[in-house]
Amino acid sequence: MPEQKRDYYEVLGVSKGATDDELKKAYRKLAKQYHPDLNPDDKTAEARFKEVNEAYEVLSDKEKRGRYDQFGHAGVDPNFNPGGGFGGFDMGDIDLGDIFGSFFGGGFGGGFGGGARRNGPVKGETLRASVTISFEEAAFGCEKEISLTRSEPCEACKGSGCAPGTTAETCPDCRGSGVVRIQRGGGAFSFATQVQCPKCSGTGKLIHTPCKSCNGAGAVRKQRKITVKIPAGIDNGQAISLRGQGGAGKNGGPAGDLVIGVTVKPHAQFKRDGVHVYLDQKVSFLQATLGAELEIPTIDGKVKWTLPEGTQPGATFRLKGKGIPAVNGRGRGDQYVTVLVEVPRGLSQSQKEALRGFGRAMGELPDSGVTGEDGLKGFFDKRKKKK
């Protein structure tokens, strides 16, 4: 049984999308490494040298490379005939649309559209980026500059891939369709399949004088800075899609989209839930008892707010319309303020005595002046009963 050939791309150590320059560089390195003059009487090196030369001979020829990419080693066999193939067939090359079409006389739509053109317009690549903004920027919106690298139509050839003053030739093998039909099988099991045209690599055209700026690709990679408008009300983890700001389309197709993921930095005071903002506001024991005029921080700045007399720890109040603007522009959420009563620490002896006097006046301490850790027990309970 003959030894199976290795993949030509694997032989040269390059990817399937390698450029001509990458192929040439890899070939020169390996050819020098395994050259017989540098490895006398080394049969392994001699075999590798022949293998490297064979791989480069095929991959450096555009037409042969196209056939190899489509049919593998069989595609570059001298006895290979794209019109009739070999006696057998490879299920990996079969187009199901053509199989059904040969039996039923037409395509099936959707996934089995036999005879469809493969070189039609293709939308460009969707690019992704990310941006980090502050809590306030998310609330009120902002503009941010995004740096990205994307493919754009070549200005020199206007995306045609042809050198200025020249035009592409319609591929004679596929007549511009980008696909060719190949007869498969034999006898009662004979049918035609549709594959990418190896001569033009499915583009439907042959460029004899490629544009020097893009090497015939019709597009070039460029770095761009794009100013992005972040809408007011956007939340952490949401994304913005900019249509047409992605990679260049192919064969006249539209440019792809740019999707930007948004990360909102947490705030030191505020917490957010949808369009509502939450704040814990510390007040003193005296303020909670007697009431007070306070300045409450909001995302719009500080506002004056009256703390009612006898406010209990954990009480929550609403500041209407002081929350996050809705993304659709319809109103704003509210801000909810939760009261945290601070218990005084490190009191002086006179302050403690004053507090005990307050306890006796409230009936929490006997007139005898009994003290202890339960001295004011039940004070807040009594205040609740009086409310």
Image (cartoon, rainbow, N blue to C red):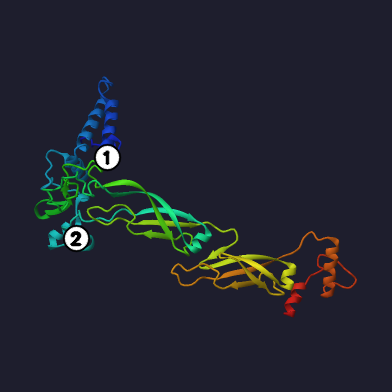
Dot in front, 2 or 1: 1
First in sequence: mark 2 or mark 1?
A: 1
Q: In the figure, is residue 29 to the left or right of 148?
A: left
Q: In the figure, is residue 305 to the left or right of 221?
A: right
Q: Nearer the viewer, residue 323 or 27?
A: 323
Q: Residue furthest left?
A: 187
**What's the residue at 23%, 60% (across, down)?**
111
Q: Which residue type carries mark 2? A: Gly
Which residue has dot 2 on it? Answer: 113
Image quadrant in which the N terminus is located = top left
Q: Position of residue 379 (x, y in %)?
A: 77, 72
Which residue has dot 1 on it? Answer: 19
For residue 38, above or below residue 82: above
Q: Counting other residues with Cα less than 10 Å from the Cα at mark 2, is it few (<14), some (14-19), or many (20 or more)?
A: some
> Is the Cβ of the residue at disc 2 closer than 8 Å to that at disc 1?
no
Q: Quadrant of residue 97?
A: bottom left
Q: Nearer the viewer, residue 159 or 39?
A: 159
Q: Secondary structure at mark 2?
A: loop
Q: Which residue type carries mark 1? A: Thr
**What's the residue at 17%, 46% (across, down)?**
200
Q: Position of residue 51 (x, y in %)?
A: 23, 31
For residue 297, above or below residue 30: below
Q: Quadrant of residue 353?
A: bottom right
Q: Counting other residues with Cα less than 10 Å from the Cα at mark 1, is it few (<14), some (14-19), or many (20 or more)?
A: few
Q: In the figure, is residue 224 to the left or right of 24?
A: right
Number of the label disc, if any, that sits on residue 1: none
**What's the residue at 28%, 35% (across, down)?**
12
Q: Secondary structure at mark 1?
A: loop
**What's the residue at 43%, 69% (across, down)?**
328
Q: Position of residue 373 (x, y in %)?
A: 81, 65
Q: Position of residue 68 (x, y in %)?
A: 20, 42
